[in-house]
Amino acid sequence: MMLVTSRGTGRWVIPKGNVGPTASLHAAAAAEAEEEAGVCGALCPVPIGAYRYRKRRGSGASLMVDVDVFPLAVTQELDDWKERAERERRWFSLADAAKAVDEADLRELIQSFAPAQFQLAVRQGGRHRRPPGHPAKGNSMFAWFQRLLPKTGNFFELFEAHAATVLAGAEATARLLDGGPAGKEHIREIIEREHDADEITREVLKSVRATFLTPFDRASITALIGSLDDTIDEMQAAAAAIDLYDVSSFAPEMRDMAAIVVDAARLAAEAMPL
């Protein structure tokens, strides 16, 4: 995650600010992220948490402030932004970010986030194998359970790869709805991701028929992969309609929905490893 330094004290904090009289909370959060950190992207309108800290006012008073935290999927890092000369921005791992911040509530909130350390497929969005010596970092509590399950079929690996592909498609959809001259490229990526997902789906369905003993109910396997595939199919259908009618500008509500899709896809990809 990205942190920025505060003005004056140089403490590591998340971008934040006051809400204007007419702005929504998530719109204000997006504006602060661009002004303070120089980043833009798909911002989910639903907060993922909140924290409190004590802020010193100009009068000398030290008052408690409540902060709602919104997830932003960064699609662009600006070379120049409003407060560039006043702040430093830096990417941290979740563990390092928790250590870097001073506010106890914010530290606890960061520590509650699941680390998004997926397979290589998450980084590249396709069905790539994990490099030797780099085991999956899924839910280690249940790793023993997976070892007891049948190895034939590679269902868990296929589910992880499909979830990673859905996440990549969601991020491309968010970039598309963010507007800009690269819309055709984002549409092409969404279509390619949908084709990748179809290949994974076909392999899962083939494995279900060919595997004598599946790790869990066959109907549940087909239902899960079908739901994942339906998700990216909807993204592809939206991209095709945007391309057909040459839509280049999008209402804020559409961008909000895309941000929700990205956040949901991220959660699915994090939850998928067993």
Image: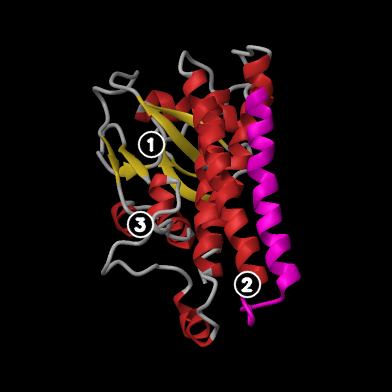
- Cα–Cα span, label 1 and label 2: 72 Å
Residue 28 locus on image (x, y percent): 55, 27
The part of the image, by quadrant, that contains residue 200 is: bottom right
The part of the image, by quadrant, that contains residue 116 is: bottom left
Indicate which disc, 2 or 3, sits on the residue closer to the N terminus: 3
Tag 2: amino acid? Ala
Q: Which residue is mark 1?
A: 60
Packing grade of label 2 (10 A; few <14, some 14-19, many >=20) is few
Q: Is residue 228 magenta?
A: yes
Residue 263 locus on image (x, y percent): 57, 45
Coloured how?
secondary structure
Q: Which residue is mark 3?
A: 98
Residue at figure coordinates x 49%, y 15% from the top left: 180
Q: Secondary structure at mark 2?
A: helix
Residue at figure coordinates x 38%, y 46% from the top left: 1
- Cα–Cα span, label 2 and label 3: 46 Å
In the rendered image, the residue lying farthest to the right is: 219
On the rendered structure, is 71 left or right of 76?
A: right
Indicate which disc, 1 or 3, sits on the residue closer to the N terminus: 1
Most common SS among magenta residues: helix
Residue at figure coordinates x 28%, y 43% from the top left: 11
Front disc: 1 or 2: 2
